[in-house]
């Protein structure tokens, strides 16, 4: 009884491809393997099986009777194997698993709802965990995939991707407050005004302004300190004082005549919004999908109609 060695899978694939393509040249192009290598593999398969599978001519190849029967048996198996490999590749590319994201509380409330709804609909196999918090989360230590943060960013070793256009911040007050208290002409004059600050304490707040050569900060005494721009905006509109607000958030009230930008000539350059993530986690399909959707959707920048023009 003859002993037949187990066939090398790469040789079987070469044989099936040569038959499917009708020759070695076409199979070579399809597989990206030199024609001589395919010929060697088919010859090795015939040696392993101790039988002739193909009859080669100068223009074509033909199956022997044994080769035809062998091809009938192995071709479906090779097709199934290739389909299974394609499925594994697709699973690696299709977003699955979990995405853990963190953002500042108010930013998340303002911008993330539609994004997360779209993501959940588009990628139903991904579980979302979103933590809205105003503390600085350590993504690596606490196991988060990404965070949304306002620049400038600290050198943390995280990868950063900018989201949308520049985010501008200005100083605003209502016309009735300015009629009552006067309009500050330079940042130092804020010492004589009621300042509404985005801060968790009532003393020690500092606001940045553009100076002659570089940025400078001015200490302001908070008349009210609130960790919500929405509340600060409402207080400013009501005439409670001067607030430092994102320009996009103030814009509708500027257009309505409810707020006026002051100290515009001292406004600091716009900053940016970023998605930051550990480099290793950015390779996961689900995290990549979230990053792409955030980049497509979130834009807290853009022009602000009706804002005061800086003096020349």
Image (cartoon, helix red, strand yellow):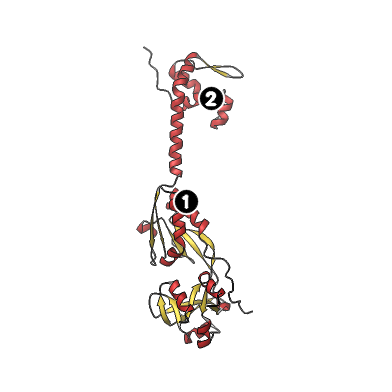
Residue 263 horizontal/vertical position (percent): 55, 80
Q: Which quadrant of the figure contains the N terminus? A: top left
- Is 259 in front, or is 128? 259
Q: Is residue 35 above or below residue 241?
A: above
Question: How many numbered discs, if any?
Answer: 2
Q: Secondary structure at mark 1?
A: helix
What residue is disc 1 on?
289
Q: Residue at x 49, y 61 (%)?
A: 274
Residue 265 versus residue 294 in the image, above or below: below
Mark 1 vs 2: CB contact within 8 A: no
Going from N to C along the chain, the mark reached first, 1 or 2, is 2
Reply above or below: 291 against 217.
above
Label 2 crowding class (10 Å Cα cut-off): few <14, some 14-19, many 20+?
few
Q: Quadrant of residue 138?
A: bottom left
Answer above or below: position of 133 versus 117: below
Q: Position of residue 158 (x, y in %)?
A: 45, 58
Residue depicted at 56% across the width and 74% down the height: 255
Residue at 52%, 26% (x, y): give it: 17
Q: Residues within 10 Å of mark 1 (few under 14, many from 20)?
A: some
The Cα–Cα distance between marks 1 and 2, rounded to whole angstroms, is 37 Å
Q: Nearer the viewer, residue 50 or 248?
A: 248
Q: Nearer the viewer, residue 294 or 49?
A: 294
Quarter of the image for the C terminus: give it: bottom right
Under circle 2, the secondary element is helix
Residue 154 lies, in percent from the top left, at 45, 65
Q: Which residue is mark 2?
A: 20
Q: Residue at x 38, y 77 (%)?
A: 201
Asked whether residue 9 appears in the rendered view, the answer is no
């Amino acid at each position: 009884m003859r002993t037949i060695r187990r066939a090398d899978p790469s040789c079987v694939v070469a044989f099936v491809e040569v038959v499917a393509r009708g020759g070695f040249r076409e199979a070579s192009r399809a597989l990206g393997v030199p024609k001589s290598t395919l010929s060697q593999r088919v010859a090795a398969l015939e040696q392993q099986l101790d039988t002739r599978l193909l009859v080669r001519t100068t223009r074509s190849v033909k199956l022997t009777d044994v080769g035809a029967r062998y091809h009938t048996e192995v071709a479906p198996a090779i097709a199934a194997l290739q389909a299974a490999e394609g499925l594994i590749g697709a699973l690696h590319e299709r977003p699955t698993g979990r995405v853990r994201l963190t953002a500042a509380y108010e930013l998340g409330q303002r911008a993330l709802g539609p994004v997360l709804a779209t993501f959940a609909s588009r990628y139903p196999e991904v579980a979302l965990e979103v933590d809205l918090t105003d503390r600085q989360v350590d993504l690596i230590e606490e196991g988060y995939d990404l965070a949304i943060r306002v620049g400038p960013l600290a050198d943390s070793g995280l990868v950063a991707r900018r989201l949308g256009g520049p985010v501008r911040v200005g100083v605003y007050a209502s016309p009735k407050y300015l009629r009552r208290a006067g309009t500050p002409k330079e940042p130092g004059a804020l010492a004589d005004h009621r300042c509404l600050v985005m801060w968790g304490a009532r003393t020690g707040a500092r606001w940045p302004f553009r100076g002659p050569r570089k940025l400078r900060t001015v200490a302001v005494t908070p008349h009210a300190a609130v960790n919500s721009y929405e509340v600060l905006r409402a207080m400013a509109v009501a005439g409670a004082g001067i607030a430092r607000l994102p320009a996009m958030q103030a814009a509708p009230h500027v257009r309505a005549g409810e707020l006026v930008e002051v100290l515009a000539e001292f406004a600091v350059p716009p900053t940016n919004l970023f998605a930051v993530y550990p480099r290793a986690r950015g390779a996961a399909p689900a995290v990549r999908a979230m990053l792409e959707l955030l980049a497509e959707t979130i834009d807290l920048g853009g022009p602000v109609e009706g804002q005061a023009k800086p003096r020349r």
